[in-house]
Image: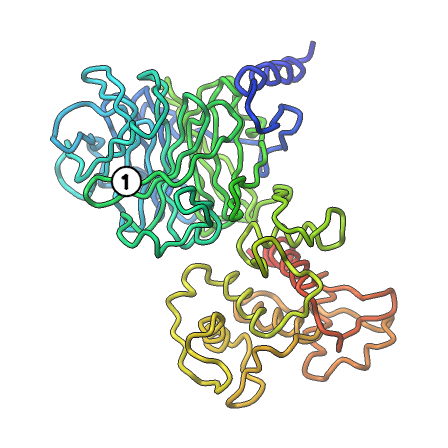
Amino acid sequence: MKITSIRTLAKALALILVLGSVAIPITASSAVAWPGEQSVVTFDNTATFFSDSSGLDFADGKLYVCDNKKGAVWVLDAAEDGSLTMSSLTSDSPKYILYKDGYGDPDAEGIAVDGEGYVYIAAERDNSVGRSRNTILKADLNTDETDIPAVQEWDIGSTLPVVDPNRGIESIEFVPFGELEGKLYDTKKCAALRASDYPDAVAGGVFFVGLEQNGHVYAYILYPDGSFTQIADIDTGMGKVMSLAYDDADHILWAKADDTCLNTSVTLVFNGTREPGRILVDPPSELDAESNYEGFAIASADYAVNGKKPVYFLCDGLSSGALLIGSLDCPTTLPVIRNNVFIDVPEGTWYTEAALWCSAHGYITGTGENTFSPKAPLTRAMFVQILARTAVGDRLKEYKYNGKFSDVSSGAWYAKAVQWAVEDNVTGGTSETTFSPNSPVTREQLSTFFFAYAKSKGYDVSASADLGKYTDAKQISGWAANAVRWAVAEGLISGTSDTALSPKTNATRAQAAVILKNFIEIYAAKQK
């Protein structure tokens, strides 16, 4: 029997054992191939870390590594070319995280970093006594001291199932509210998450932890006084979770298993319902699936080269060769995660995949609790909001509308997006004093919006198609001609028939979703 056949059989048996009777129908045959290069390279050819390497996190240009014996943490600096060097913070020695009282040996299984640079450790037990102690520890590494007592700790064990001391929380990840607002289902409120419900949340976001015992991911709001609220319990279907990593470029939470599940992962896309979209993903083919890779981290999109960004795998039990570097496609090439959110987006239409993709990524939200309104006209207000979400994401809240247009009030849901569009020269008003937010966007106007946005990003907009086969090409407005020729050349739009472009026809939300997906996945991806 070929080695690949043996591994396939082993994987099927492993998944049957761990998935058993779980409700989510994830099987070995449903896994998709790793969406990136299949090769991996070794970082630490000589002994660099301790032999119980367990957790990874990438934040603000740094890779954080933790060891689970004595709460040891290393920090590495990432260069633009993806190379790693030991940070001056831990060049002489790792930092050792202690419990808040300054005692104990936290079993540091997972590590996360918030927006202010504080480190959070997921510790499943106190190794000095060998007892279960499922605790999140917050520490400040910016000190000359080697032993660092936690500045706060949260003992979350009471909200978890009773677990063996070596099968507790294995991973932790921090995600800011801006990524989860309206997407993560809050079981305490029985509704999609609202940041305003948790004004005192530590770091302004949610902390996810993965449990080895059952493969669940739990979401917590942490408070400064050491109290906390569990707001979600998500079954990944893998039977165990050993590492978590949030990809903020593609808005996906990765939950990864270890060698007992042959290092498969489940990707979670939050969609405002109790059931996130899920896809089971194989590891890179060159990663030894039978080795115990407990740590996983994803670099930010800023580190992408030729459409690939670095990812990191950390193997427990090795004194050298523990840290491997691979890659992920940027943006992701994972198939669309079917979430059945929209009752008016049937399977198999020309816009189904794009509508669900745009929704899963937070670019185009629904018009109601379970409606997308694909055939509804696209308005100018809708479209500047879509482009603004795409361009600046959560930073949109930092924009302040200056009141330039008489028909845009400062409290309008699209006011900040209008301000962004004007400041970035994506569009102006329909006159000096009006924006016409409720006016429909025609197909030629849609092209000019994307054309202007591409130019504002410094992208190559030199492509130009011959529109001679379209009998209505002469209907294209002079000011839109270059944009339409560019959009057709780049495959962003196509004719409404073999001989018609319909430039004056009002664009629909479905058309906007298709063009946006093409713009990001095809056109923008090759600009890097």
Q: Determine the secondary structure under disc 1.
A: strand
Other residues around mark 1 within 10 Å, as few (<14) / some (14–19) / many (≥20): some
Image quadrant for the N terminus? top right
In the image, residue 144 above or below residue 433: above
For badge 1, the amino acid type reads Phe
Instruction: Give the x, y percent position of residue 249.
Output: 49, 50
Q: Is residue 42 left or right of residue 336?
A: left
Residue drawn at (62%, 71%) of the image: 451
Q: Is residue 298 left or right of residue 463?
A: left
The correct choice, above or below, for 294 with respect to 376 in the image is above
Instruction: Report the quarter where the C terminus lies.
Output: bottom right
Q: Nearer the viewer, residue 391 or 457?
A: 391
In x, y percent, where is residue 102?
A: 12, 30
Rendered position, 478 above or below 333: below
Give percent across and percent down for residue 297: 42, 37
Report which quarter residue 150 is drawn in: top left
Check disc 1 and report the residue beneath it.
228
| Number of numbered discs | 1
- The residue sitting at the bottom extreme is 432
| Residue 281 percent coordinates (x, y) | 58, 32
For the point 34% across and 16% down, the residue is 164
Report the residue at 69% width, 76% height from top. 482
